[in-house]
Image (cartoon, grey):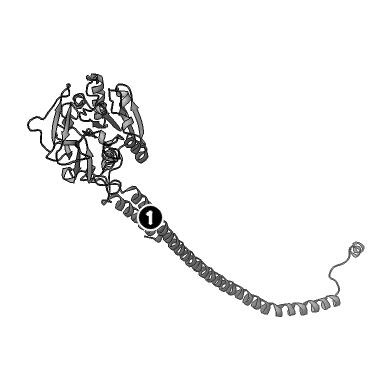
Amino acid sequence: MNSKKFYTTMFVIALLAIVIQMSFTSPGTFETAGFKGENPIVIFDVAHQTFFNNTHMQSALDLLETKYDAEIIINEDNFTLTSLRGADLLILPAPYYLAEDPYSPLEKLALTEYIQDSGSVLFMANPFLFEDSMRNFTSQTNYLNSMMDGTYGELSFQPRNTLMLNDFSYRYDDQRFIYLDNSSFDTDHSIITGNPKIDEAIDELLTITTSISATGSSERVLTVPETSYYMEYTDENTSSIPVGAVSNHTILNANEKYGGRAISICSGIMFSDLEIPGANMTWYEAYDNAQLWENIISWVFFQLPVDSPTNPVPDFWIFTLSILGGFLVLIVFGLILFTAGKETKRVEVSEALQKMREKDTRQKREDKEIDEAFYAEDDVEDEVIEEEEEPVEEVKKVDMKSISDEVKKKPPKTRSRSDRRRQD
């Protein structure tokens, strides 16, 4: 193998090593966002007698725009296959508690198609609030449950007009304002732990909530303390505490299906800009409520790690730095190879030129020796010829002179023409 092939092979091996190392990065990894387009599209429904709507959750929705550059669409019409197509997340608050079923069979079919097309849904409900100033935020959970049937039925809420209370773990002198710490959390779920690269863990929460009736195959993420109980309200504003109402009721469930994710949360108000009575803050600002919202959105956007990631991708900055570092290494390595190759080529050319010069010198020397030998033979022949011709020339000169004298002495053998005529 010559030097050029060797250095090329080493370069390819180094490049493959860098790519393989980046492909198997495991610490601090998370799934890439599964958006259907370049940026996530979020639909917030206000078309189904929803008095608790986007105007009360402006801070929460602003997070979607600032962190994910999401496009927020406020839906004011019935659901159709066309209107839901292409969306990444549908936020579906429950309708007003006195409303009749506002969802048509066609809308339920459209929602089912959307979910089966890997769409994610956030189902939100609020408890019954009996005071006039808060009554409009009360939810009718029965009709929201009907939207989950056949798709996410295990996320169903308790029957309408229920409110969770706790006599021991509450804040601001109101037993409805239930305080939660990590003893009520599923601390292994990524919604609670968060991704250390992009989110934070949840430690404390404040909620006013109803509950979820059954978990099924879904995951229980948040529960209230086991001393909590629920109170039922009737349309005549009478209340009662049923038998067996005390339990650590579930208030947030999560599930994955058809390639999408869904969450049912029993308190939309805890993410709202409504002020907490007796506190100088909003529900969104209380404890880690805002962080919980951020972790929920991260989870439905597939931004949090799973137990066994199949195709882990490094954190953006780590990935970027790795690319830049690898690029610089390749440049340096390439320069070294180029310099070494250039020097090797120069040496090879120099050696070839030296060999050519030596060969040319030998050729010239041989040609000179041949010429000298050839001309030496010609000189010898010329000398021999001169030595042989010199005496012949002298003899010829002597003979010619003697012959000339003899001719003069002797009479001519021939007669002139006139003499021949006279004789005749």
Q: Is residue 211 visible?
A: no
Where does the image place residue 406, in percent across and percent down from the top left? Answer: 82, 78
The picture quadrant where one finds residue 336 is: bottom left
SS for tag 1?
helix
Q: Is residue 32 left or right of residue 247?
A: right
Where does the image place residue 345, in percent across and percent down from the top left? Answer: 46, 62
Q: Which residue is mark 1?
A: 325
Q: Is residue 405 above or below residue 93?
A: below
Classify the position of the N terminus by image quarter.
bottom left
Residue that extends furthest to the left in the rendered view of this protein: 243
Q: Is residue 105 left or right of residue 383?
A: left
> 422 or 214: nearer the eye?
214
- What's under tag 1, amino acid-wise? Gly
Which residue occupies 89% across, 65% down? 416
Classify the position of the C terminus by image quarter.
bottom right
Q: Is residue 401 above or below residue 227?
A: below
Q: Is residue 420 above or below residue 169?
A: below
Judge the density around disc 1: few (<14), some (14-19), many (≥20) Cα neighbours within 10 Å: few
Which residue occupies 67% across, 80% down? 387
> What number of labels is visible?
1
The picture quadrant where one finds residue 238 is: top left
> 244 or 125: nearer the eye?
244
Where does the image place residue 249, in percent across and percent down from the top left? Answer: 14, 36
> 224 or 327: nearer the eye?
224
Where does the image place residue 415, in percent across and percent down from the top left? Answer: 87, 67
Q: Is residue 135 visible?
A: yes
